[in-house]
Amino acid sequence: MKTEMKVLLYLKKNEQDMNGLCPLMGKITIKGKENSVAQFGCKIKVNPNIWNATSQRCTGKSNIAITTNKEIESLLLLLRSRFNELDDYNEVVSALDVKNALQGIAAAQTTLLKLFEEHNEEFALRIGVNRTANTYYEYLNTYRILAEFINFKYKVSDVPIKSLDISFVESFDLWMRVEKKYMPNTFSGHIIRLKKIVRMAIYKGIITIHPFADFKPQKGDKKQLYLTEDELSRFMNATFDTPNRNFTRDMFLFSVFTGFCYCDICNLTESNIKKDSNGNLWIETTRQKTGTPENVLLLDVAVQLIEKYRGTASNGKLFPMLLNTSINPHLKIMAKQCGINRRLTFHMARHTFASQICLSGGVPIETVSKAMGHKNISTTQRYAKVTNEKIDRDVTALRNNITGKYSLEGINEPPSTILKDMSNRKSRPSRKLQNIGG
């Protein structure tokens, strides 16, 4: 059942002050799984003579009426914003929750690390449902780094949520750069996770505004994460010195030609392979990370790899996957042997699928997004980059398409003729000047 909120505004006329103004009150009513009501003071004084109970606004065009109505609009907008935040985060929202979120009422001394710890405990329960263990460990690491910073900077074990301000996150950012010597992508990740905990404090009504919502950490230089056509060719044709590295090559290439990430390849079974009416083989599965469908047509290379390892894995799995902690060290050594002069990770195969296989092959980005199981096309845009090979092919095709279609008049006229004509025009007296002189 959809949760709905209504707000009724009314005057408390029995508490009229010396100036004849009455305090404005509000009544929040929420209808949903659990109906609830809560009353609150708006901290706005209103002249009862210009109050319209039906419209819940002041009547007239006086400065007082206009100013009061603006205050009411701002209050209702803030109230709606707090309700939406709570509704996004919680399954059930009560009127008291919205009131507390509006007024910043919560536990008297809720601290940052205590709230962070609560978040991590809840996160741990959702691992395997809609959260991953790797992300959980990232939050644990941020918690540890944050506790170390608080002890270093403030000489205490924790700080109240309400004490946070922009200087806190600026100091945290500087400490990670100078003291810990972290790279930009590392400390920006810690700050992103810290911001989520602060948003959680807002949803719980502990604070009313985000103390450093506008703070943006410096991002590292964007690196090319896909293999070029030449690099991919060298990697495909290489033979390595151990069976595990040859297997790693094959799994990397399976990801290159399907777009599946490491954890989804680990989950693939024979039952995920489907055949359409034309005899084409597809893999139909659901992404472990997001739960979205991921349906991919199997290209020849992927089919060959499935046949190569058919029956070698237990429990009906397609492949006897190695641990991710051993795959990436193998790839680091393999990249050097192939003359690829940058760090190679398994996830770069997914980037190569989006950029080199699909986008450079003429597949629209909307189709790439569906094939990769992305919820938003903006996510796909981080993967699918226009390669130099695609630019070269597209410009060559453009040249072939427009050859003979356009012509430029006077293109064969010698430049000396044009320049001479321009010179003669400059030397002629203006007609207007001749008329004035006449």
Image (cartoon, rainbow, N blue to C red):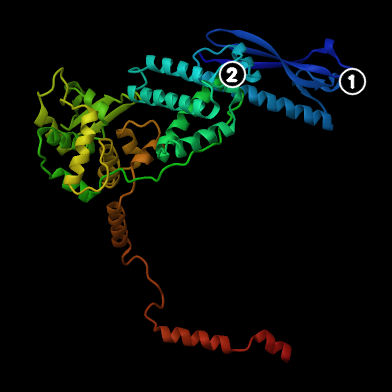
Q: Residue at image x 38%, y 77%?
A: 411
Task: Check residue 406 in the rendering and tell me which mark sits there, or answer none.
Answer: none
Q: Quadrant of residue 329?
A: top left
The residue mark sitting in front, 2 or 1, is 2
Query: Residue 189's spot in the image, x, y percent?
Result: 43, 33
Q: How far is the residue under mark 2 from the one under mark 1?
A: 35 Å
On the image, which quarter does residue 84 sit in? top right
Residue at the disc numbered 1: 19
Secondary element at image label 2: loop
| Mark 1 residue element | loop
User: Residue reaching furthest bottom?
Assistant: 438
Q: Are marks 2 and 1 in contact (CB under 8 Å)?
A: no
Viewer-proximal residue, 17 or 134?
134
Relative horizontal placement of residue 31, taking residue 113 as reference (left or right): right
Residue where numbered disc 2 is placed: 206
Asked whether residue 20 is in view, the answer is yes
The residue positioned farthest toward the right in the image shown: 18
Quadrant of image for the C terminus: bottom right
Q: Position of residue 64 (x, y in %)?
A: 83, 29
Say whether residue 51 is left or right of residue 415: right
Query: Residue 408, image x and y in percent?
Result: 40, 72
Please name the residue shown 10% across and 26% down the image: 310
Which residue type does callout 1 highlight?
Asn
Q: Earlier in the sequence, mark 2 or mark 1?
A: 1
Determine whether 61 is above or below 25 in the image: below
Q: Is residue 126 above or below residue 190?
A: above
Category of crowding for the residue at label 2, using alpha-carbon neighbours closer than 10 angstroms: few (below 14), some (14–19), many (at least 20): many
Asked if 22 appears above or below 408 in the picture, the reply is above
Residue type of the residue flagged with mark 2: Ile
Residue 10 in the figure: left or right of residue 275? right
Q: Is residue 61 visible?
A: no
